[in-house]
Amino acid sequence: MSFFESLTKRSKLKAAIKQTTEARGSEGIKADQLFNKVYHDYAEVVADEPLVAEALYNWGFALLHQARTKSGETAANLYQDAIAKFSFCLTIEPAYLGAAIDGGVAYMELARVKAVEANDALYESATSYFKKANAIQAGSASYNLACIYGLRNDKEGCLTALEISKGKGSLPVSADILADPDMAGVKDQDWFIDFMASLNQKPQVPILTSPAVSEAVEGAPLTEIIEEASASEETEVAVKDDNAVAEQDAAVNEKAEVAGEAVKS
């Protein structure tokens, strides 16, 4: 492929991505027409090797969002098509994070459309995609895994995934977690309530104290501790000052003695 052809495909890909955004904001027949148009454009981009992974991801991304506007078999078919695009993308570029995360999301949403149990193979496939995403970027899909574990009422798995997501800064805001239907089965359990409460706790800032305060008797009033510490510090300063004066006096006396000896000589 020539350099000019590569630029042309890049331009077509950008236009298709822009039209995907427009399609997502549309409804009904107009949305379907726009989605079908971008699918044709993505297919043209994929016709040659350069930009294939990016085109496949965005193609799958468009299919995923169109599926959300449908129901039943129509939605299921679109989800399956999206999954195929994400899978192909990961085959070409195994470290494509977006394809790993959205592939798992597509499997989860397909599972909901088909109304399968939480231990169904579709959720297992979603779990596999999310673990792949975490391998690419640690914690990036830990909350998604927590949702699957929450559906299964797996306390240990859910809490561990939530803690990892919290530590990696990928945790949604509290309101979104509480409103998440995947957490409906666990949100009234004590461990989950404790975890949510921990999100609102501000970290305690340690108070730096002098040695005098550190050695103060536990349980003593704070004002008393501060006064003792201040008195201790003042005493230390006074002792240092006294020592300095004593040293200066000794030096003067020594000089006087030397001078006296000189006069005698």
Image (cartoon, rainbow, N blue to C red):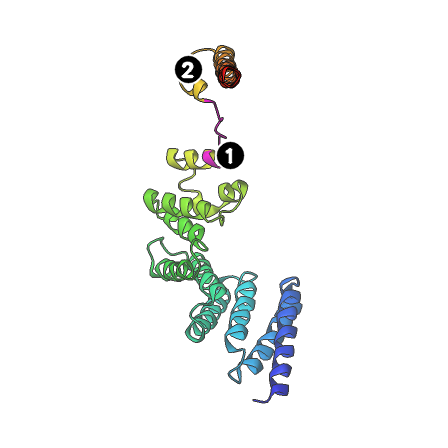
Which numbered disc covers residue 216? Answer: 2
Residue type at numbered disc 1: Asn
Point out the stretch of residues depicted in magenta.
198-210
> In the image shown, does 10 or 175 lie closer to the viewer?
10
Residue sticking out furthest to the bottom: 2
Residue visible at 56% across and 63% down in the picture: 65
Q: Quadrant of residue 160?
A: top left
Residue 126 in the image, given as x and y percentages of width and height: 40, 60
Residue 84 in the image, given as x and y percentages of width and height: 44, 72
Nearer the camera: disc 2 or disc 1: 2
* Mark 2 vs 1: CB contact within 8 A: no
Residue type at numbered disc 2: Ala
Magenta residue check for 186: no
> In the image shown, does 153 or 239 lie closer to the viewer?
239
Q: Please say if 157 is above or below 51.
A: above
> In the image shown, does 24 or 139 lie closer to the viewer?
139
Which numbered disc covers residue 200? Answer: 1
